[in-house]
Amino acid sequence: MKFETILEEIDGFGPFQIIIIVLMCTPRIVLPCHFLLNNFIAASPPHRCDISSLDDGGLFENLTLGQRLTASIPVQEDGEPKSCEMFAEPQLQLLANSSDSADLPTVQCQSGWVYDNSTFTSTLATEWDLVCDRKSLTKTTSTIFFFGVMMGAIAFGYLCDRYGRRNTLLASYIMAIVFGFSSTFANSYVLFAVLRFLTGFGLTGISITSIVLSIEWVDTGRRSFIGVIGSLAWSVGNMLLAGFAFLVNDWRTLIMTVTAPLGFAVLTWWWIPESARWLLANGKVERAQFYLDRCAKFNKRPKLSSKLKLETLSSIEIREKSQKSFTYLHLIKTPKMRQLTLLSGIVWYGVASTYYGISLNISGFGLNMYLTHFIYAAIEVPAKLMIYCLLNIIGRRKCQAGTLLLTGVCIALNMFIPKGLWHLRAVVAILGKGLSEASFTTIFLYTTELYPTVIRQNGLGYTSFMSRLGVSVAPLILLLEDVWTLLPQIIICSVAIVSGLVSLLLPETLNMSLPETIDDIEKPRRNDASSQSAEPSGVFLQPKSTTDTPQ
């Protein structure tokens, strides 16, 4: 007996499931607002050395600001003052163009910097002077945040399987709210970095729990629909971030703005049901009966005909849990689980590193950063609609491999397109961004279908850890452009292609019932059709019942 049999009686996709999707939208909209927030709060506006200390009423008394800048700061090729250098001594002879400034001695800025506040009232860079020789600290802020996300993935993956999806989700909401708002009051860079780490830690629970909780309540044919709808909420939040950042120019206020919706999410948490799959897998039959009866009521179906059916199902589901509880070690204890863990981890690393490597680089195409970010976010919508259609036609594995490989091709093409053709470069980059998001949409759904219920959240916690490892490295990879301009693109392109090839080794899960126990992965059942018996990775999944039809 499978859980899908129970869902058939109470409707695996009705008003009850729609309510779950709606309740999960608000927190998922918040996620991209924090994950890509560094594009705006850590932006470095145009700046130059502060020369006010040179204005002592003597030499500069009768000079205009322009003349003072000419005598104090060397210029770049475009005629603008250099950002990080000034002359060792004021060079008044330059006012008459009597000498070449290239040979004049310069020093680093001595009295701080003056910033152009026309775009941003305040950013991390202007708050703590994270420019010039300290500019890497702005990227480091993003890396620290994603390290928090990475650690949270491990912690919440365990907590969700141990204490349930619903309770862990509430803990995530509260942590994200507390540390998110606290970071806006940070009075030093170190304190801010610590609070951003903790904010990322809390947000991870929302990321990995919401998608699993949604998918575990729907039937086999609608899993791809749920995965794509949940992912569309991310795209909406991503587009809203561009609007919020355009309207709110102060970094502290912007963090408050994007964190505030989680207060509404806490209020709606009371209507979120626990996963009946998880309850049955842990022997909590009566509690599972409560939520399944509520589902039947909302979907206008009769209550379950017999509690004996649930008890029978529960006894099967907890077969492996009778003598032990599951930990992350069970991901690698058996051969096929070990193979699945290795391959899925590599793919997740590649997907995340590629997506954020593109998303965190929103300059260089002749458009302002707000418009570029919005376009990058907007292209995700048609990409997700496209992948939704393909998921049920060509399957998960081909979609995963195809989107990653094509993303790598787009990145490679942009390395050879001249910078003067910025229109073409922008089109190719936007196409690559859409494909990278399509690969992210696929991997979330794909992973929930690959891992069995008893360790599904542990599996998603592990893969989310690998994902955030890739994300944490992405900002540091972008810093390598100071070594060689093309080096970041070469690395990201290579990662996309390699992870795309690795995904071809994973099993197909289209029209397959969700595995419930590790035995479902390790030992194919006797009633498995022979046509379903050979998958490239050697991992077996239960074929879907013939009464189910893909959406």
Image: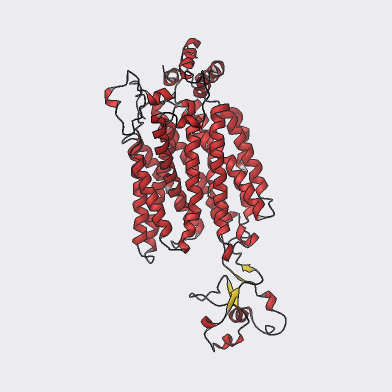
287 w.r.t. 390: above or below:
above
The one of 498 and 391 positioned closer to us in this rendering:
498
- Residue at (57% x, 70% y) in the render: 84
**415 and 429: which is toward the camera:** 415
Instruction: Say if residue 512 shows up in the picture.
Output: yes
Describe residue 443's horizontal placement relative to residue 188 as left or right: left
The residue positioned 60% from the left and 29% from the top of the image is: 167
Quadrant of res 337: top left
Residue 362 seen in the current view: no
> What color scheme is it?
secondary structure
The quarter holding residue 43 reads bottom right
Quadrant of image for the C terminus: top left
Up/down of 149 relative to 548, above or below: below
Q: Position of residue 467 (x, y in %)?
A: 47, 43
- The image quadrant where one finds the N terminus is top left
Q: Between residues 32 and 268, which one lies in front from this camera angle?
A: 32
Position of residue 519 in the picture relative to residue 240 (left or right): left
Residue 430: percent from the left, percent from the top? Answer: 40, 53
Residue at image location 53% in from the left, 42% down from the top: 150
With respect to residue 174, does 65 lie above or below? below
Q: Where's residue 382, x and y in %? A: 40, 45
Task: Please indicate whether residue 4 sits to the left or right of residue 44 in the image.
Answer: left
Relative to 250, say whether 147 is above or below.
above
| Residue 65 horizontal/vertical position (percent) | 63, 78
Residue drawn 64% across the image and 37% down it: 174
Q: Residue furthest right?
A: 57
- Total count of labels: 0
